[in-house]
Structures are given as C-alpha cells and as structure tokens.
C-alpha cells in the first residue's frame, strides 16, 4: 500500500440510477468511513442543465467524489470548477463505462484508446481545482487486453499529473455486449492490477470488480491501495459496515436499526419537499439481507412505498412485518 495516500481505503462505486443522493445519504449512515461516488454526471449536462440540481448533495456525504463523463477539455474543466465550488472532495473521470450512448458521446471506456485526449481533459481540470482529479478505468478494451495498452494509458495520464487510478479489473467489450454483460462476461484479472501497482508504486491504485466478502478484500488489500465496491454495496449494504469493522474503525459504528431510525427524519424532510417515499426506500431494500425477516422487509417496502401518499409509517410497518416474520420462523 502507498503510505502517503490520504484517501479512504474503501469506496462505493459510481452506479447510474443507484448511487443518487438518497442512496448516498443512506450509505453514509451505514459506513462513516467509505468514500462515496456520485452516479456519472456528464459535463454537457452540467453545462446545459441545472447544475445545482445535478450536483446537489448533503454535507454528511463527505468524503464524496463526483464522477464526470465527457471528453471535451473545456466542458470537463467547467464541470470540475462547478463541482469543486460546491465542495466535492475528488473529481473522477469516467473511462470505464461501455454503453453505446456513452461511446457516441466520446466518453467512457472507449477513451482508453485516446489517452492524449483524456490527459488534455485532466490537465485543464486539475489546473482549475484544488481537489484531486482521478481516473476510473478498465484494464483494456476489446482485443487490447495487455499490459502495454494499459501502461500507455497510465503513462500518459501520470505524465499529465494524475496520481489516482481506480481500475475495474476486466476489459470492456465496446460492441456486442450490454453494459450489464460488460460487468460480468469479460473475466476478472486481478493480477494485472496488482502488477500495475507493483510497477507504479508512486501511484494510488484502487481495485474494483467482483468483491463480495471480507475474505475477498483481505486477499486484495496487500496488493493495492484500496478497494471500490459496487453491486455488493448496493444489494448488501451491511458489507460496508463489516468492512469498517474489519479495517479497525471503531468510532460511531451503527447497527441496522440505528440506520433506519436515523433515516426517518431525512425521509420525512424529503417527503415534505415532494420526494416519493419509494425513491428513497428502494435503496434500503438490502439493509437486512441475510437477517431473519429480511424478505418481509423487502416485500413490504416494495409493495407499499410507491403508493400515493406513502409516508414514514410505511417504514415502521415494514419493520413490524419483518419482526413478525422473524418470530414466526
Ligand atoms: C447499475 C450500475 C450502474 C453503473 N454506473 C456506472 C457509472 O455511472 N460510472 C462508472 O464508472 N461505472 C458504473 N458502473 C460500474 C461500477 O462502478 C463498477 O465498476 C462495476 O459494477 C464493478 O464493480 P462490482 O463488481 O463491485 O459491482 C455501474 C454499475 C452498475 C451495477
């Protein structure tokens, strides 16, 4: 591991439609320590759209990174300034996302083949903000699945000054696979990422992809500086709390019921602003995964939280349904 780093060891991956601000508020209650990432926000959306809404977050979400999508150095720089002015702790460039829509806009994983363009973006962005600008990438794309291709990309970015790389340890196939398939079909290659860290000890390297258990993380951490967790953090958020414990964080560690209790005032305040209960509770369905009554919790919320006028009493009833189910078992 890189002793001089000042990033958390665990991060929650950027996930479109999943890691929105309600999700992040909830995950922060689960884990006081993990770094959180926003969903990808395109630089063009910030330029043309409602930047305040797109970049809004709650102060409790720190440490918090915004992930930007784009490849126009001017737009990416402008978006970085907007994000830094609002207090994000890190600005991350998406060089990993394989979707068609993303390719047509010239951003995401296809940019691994255009390192100079990403470096131009990086230079403009990093020169304009005080917080670190980082890159999330794959190990390769299509048939370019070798160390030389990855290192050409890394060298160009490192020469531009980039110090932190988050590497999803599989290639992206840019045609023929859906984004979902691109998260499971190309095989994981952790060794490539370990070697990258060994060859570039001065860089901060986080490994991402397929991590689901403490044992997984235990095998990975001696070889890199940190881990980024995606799907498992969403489907089984308590994994993040377990990781905090595993890493020796003892302060303020909550239990699951504390988390629900502390969500209630937030939910009430959001409902008062017109947010639907289900938009928040959909991120909480996995909180009790593996616990007695978990299915009743999940089912009650799924069936009731999107009803018109649903309020926090629905959450309380979901807890009661869970208790009943666990006692009946
Ligand atoms: C629903 C969903 C949306 C995603 N959206 C993004 C995104 O906006 N930007 C990005 O870089 N990666 C995105 N990813 C990929 C994740 O950040 C992560 O790299 C991938 O899921 C592998 O990690 P995991 O095996 O821990 O889930 C998304 C993944 C999922 C499941």
Image (tube, rainbow, N blue to C red):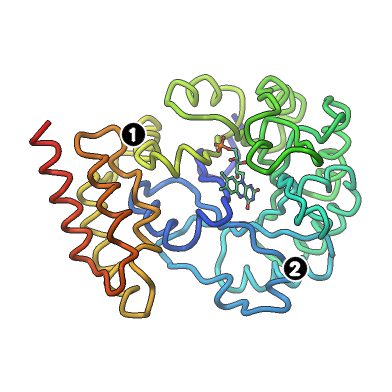
Q: Which residue occupies 66% across, 38% down?
A: 204
Q: Quadrant of ligand 1?
A: top right
- Drawn side of residue 211 relative to residue 308, left or right: right
Q: Quadrant of the N terminus?
A: top right
Q: Secondary structure at mark 2?
A: helix
For label 1, being within 8 Å of ligand 1 is answered: no
Residue 251 coordinates in the image, percent (x, y): 29, 44
What residue lies at 28% left-to-right and 44% top-to-bottom? 253
Q: Is mark 2 within 8 Å of ligand 1?
A: no
Q: Could you tell me residue 90's position as x and y percent?
A: 61, 57
Identify the image quadrant of the C terminus.
Answer: top left
Q: Quadrant of residue 101?
A: bottom right
User: Along the polypeptide, which appears first: circle 2 or circle 1?
Assistant: 2
Q: Is residue 130 left or right of residue 142?
A: left
6 relative to 145, above or below: below
Q: Are marks 2 and 1 in contact (CB under 8 Å)?
A: no
Callout 1: few (<14), some (14-19), or many (20+) C-alpha neighbours within 10 Å?
some
Foreground of the two, 233 or 195: 233
Identify the image quadrant of residue 200. top right
Please rate how many residues cluster around mark 2, counting C-alpha atoms within 10 Å: few if below 14, some from 14 to 19, many from 20: some
Residue 128: assigned label = 2
In terms of depth relative to the viewer, which is nearer, 147 or 81?
147
Taking the image as shown, residue 93 lies to the left or right of residue 3, namely: right
Distance, label 2 to label 1, CA atoms, is 37 Å
Q: x, y percentage for residue 128?
A: 75, 68
Which residue position holds label 1? 245
Q: Position of residue 51 (x, y in %)?
A: 62, 76
| Helix, strand or loop under label 1 | helix
The numbered mark at residue 120 is: none
């Amino acid at each position: 591991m890189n002793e001089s780093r000042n990033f958390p060891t665990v991060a929650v991956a950027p996930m479109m439609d999943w890691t929105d601000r309600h999700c992040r508020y909830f995950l922060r209650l689960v884990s006081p320590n993990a770094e959180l990432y926003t969903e990808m926000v395109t630089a063009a959306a910030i330029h043309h759209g409602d930047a305040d809404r797109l970049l809004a977050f709650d102060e409790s979400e720190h440490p918090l990174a915004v992930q930007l999508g784009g490849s126009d150095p001017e737009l990416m720089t402008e978006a970085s300034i907007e994000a830094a002015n609002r207090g994000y702790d890190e600005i991350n460039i998406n060089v990993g996302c394989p979707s068609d829509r993303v390719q047509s806009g010239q951003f995401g994983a296809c940019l691994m083949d255009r390192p100079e363009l990403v470096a131009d973006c990086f230079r403009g962005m990093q020169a304009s903000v005080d917080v670190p600008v980082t890159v999330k990438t794959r190990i390769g794309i299509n048939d370019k699945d070798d160390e030389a291709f990855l290192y050409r990309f890394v060298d160009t970015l490192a020469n531009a000054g980039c110090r932190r790389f988050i590497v999803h340890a599989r290639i992206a196939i840019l045609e023929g696979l859906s984004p979902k398939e691109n998260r499971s079909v190309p095989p994981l290659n952790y060794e490539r990422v370990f070697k990258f860290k060994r060859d570039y000890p001065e860089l901060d390297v986080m490994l991402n992809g397929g991590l689901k258990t403490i044992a997984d993380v235990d095998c990975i951490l001696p070889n890199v500086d940190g881990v980024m967790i995606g799907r498992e953090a969403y489907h089984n958020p308590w994994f993040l709390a377990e990781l905090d414990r595993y890493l020796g964080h003892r302060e303020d560690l909550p239990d699951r019921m504390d988390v629900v209790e502390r969500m209630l005032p937030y939910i009430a305040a959001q409902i008062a602003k017109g947010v639907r209960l289900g938009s928040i509770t959909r991120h909480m369905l996995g909180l009790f995964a593996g616990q007695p009554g978990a299915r009743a919790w999940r089912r009650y919320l799924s069936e009731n939280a999107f009803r018109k006028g649903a309020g926090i009493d629905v959450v309380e009833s979901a807890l009661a349904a869970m208790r009943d189910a666990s006692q009946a078992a």
